[in-house]
Image (cartoon, grey):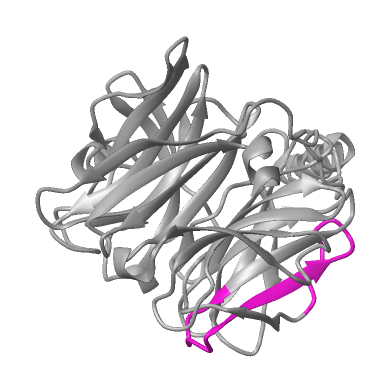
Amino acid sequence: MGALHLGLLALGLVSVLLSGYAVWRDRPLEWRFALPAAVAPVGAPVLERVFDYKASEGVAHAPAIVVEEGGARIVWFEGSAEAQPDVDIHSVALTLGPEGWQAGESAAYFTRDELGAAMEPRQLVVTLGNVVENEARQASVFATVVSVGGWAMASVADVQMGEGGPVSARKLNLSPFLNRSHLVKSPMVVYADGSHALPAYFEMGGTHGTLVRFGAEGRVRDTRRITGPGKMIQPMIVPLDEARAVAFLRDFDRSDRLWISRTQDGGQSWSVAEKTGMANPSAPVAAVGLGDGRILMAANDVEGAGDLRLLTSEDEGATWKVVTVLEPDTAGARYPMLRRVGEQFLLTYSHDTKRGIRAVVFNAAWVAAQ
């Protein structure tokens, strides 16, 4: 055997050993949900509007909530119209101090040019859409990014923020089709091993929801589909216990009903989505678990455009009770985002038919008193 053959054999052996080492040290995913502590209805009831904003022109739409030390940040996209080349991401900081909640001045959070310059590799960003917090690391968000075409050609970018804007960004590798046609809308899901999953959705052709599973180091490790007979998008996932969760889905085909899918194995597999009895004008919902099978939801649950209402379920989403009407049908209020911030809940949504952003804070005592 010559030197060349010995060299090739040695390289092959090294490759096998390295592959074996990578498999050995790779920690398999743990498919058990982590559940936050239940929020008790103690103290005086609180309901307070903490932010009310209207764009001078164009749209201000699809608000998200980034939980920060001492409060939260509301983030939305704003421009002349949705999916246009002048859309940037704006935000406002909400802080909780001795005098209660205070809203700062709204301003650009990051622009298309800033994000394009921070992308690795650097690239053109034509327009921006929905943003959600990356809860796996500080000062980071997932943004819906379009570099060519429209929403059906969007990608999801993981954006690390700094003092003056984005400092780095990379697109998640989610699709073999040029890594296109994934978007985000809903908050992340936390697992018992400290890792996270991101609800996303695929919008080209066979539209469906997707659970994007990350490892502890933050890279994409797995994806699982959430499908149904219609065009299932924008899954809002609420864990019920370590193994079970429900996903509420919007039907892009407008079947005028909210859809639900369930998992019994920590999100590894999902039932085919079924219609619920709740009316839904093809609009996303926002929901959080309250413990013991109870769920709190903000939704447009009336035929047509629909009031924006707050509802509770005591039976894991099977039936619902209306808590209050947050905005009447005439307010054009949609796209709610609901997050727990400390011992209170922060709810934000678009109003005036995508022209403005509102936010309210309330506690469990107020919900129980209704």
251 up-or-down from 12: above or below: below
Farthest-out residue, left: 57
Q: Residue 25, image x and y in percent?
A: 85, 34
Q: Is 39 on the left or on the right of 31, as rendered?
A: left
In the image, farthest residue toward the top: 98
Q: How many labels does the image show?
A: 0
Residue 181 shows in this picture: yes
Give x and y (percent) for residue 312.
69, 58
Left or right: 122, with 341 as reference point:
left
Nearest to the observer: residue 180 or residue 69: 69
Tell whether position 204 is magenta: no
Instruction: Give, as a single range, the part of the protein colored magenta.
Output: 250-271
249 in relation to 244, above or below: below
- Residue 15 place in picture, x, y as percent: 77, 43
Position above or below: 277 against 78: below
The picture places residue 240, in percent across and down from the top left corner, at 83, 53
Residue, x 77% and y 33% (percent of image)? Answer: 40
The answer to whether 81 appears left or right of 64 in the picture is: left
Camera-nearest residue between 266 and 95 = 95
Q: Quadrant of residue 306?
A: bottom left
Residue 143 visible, this angle: no
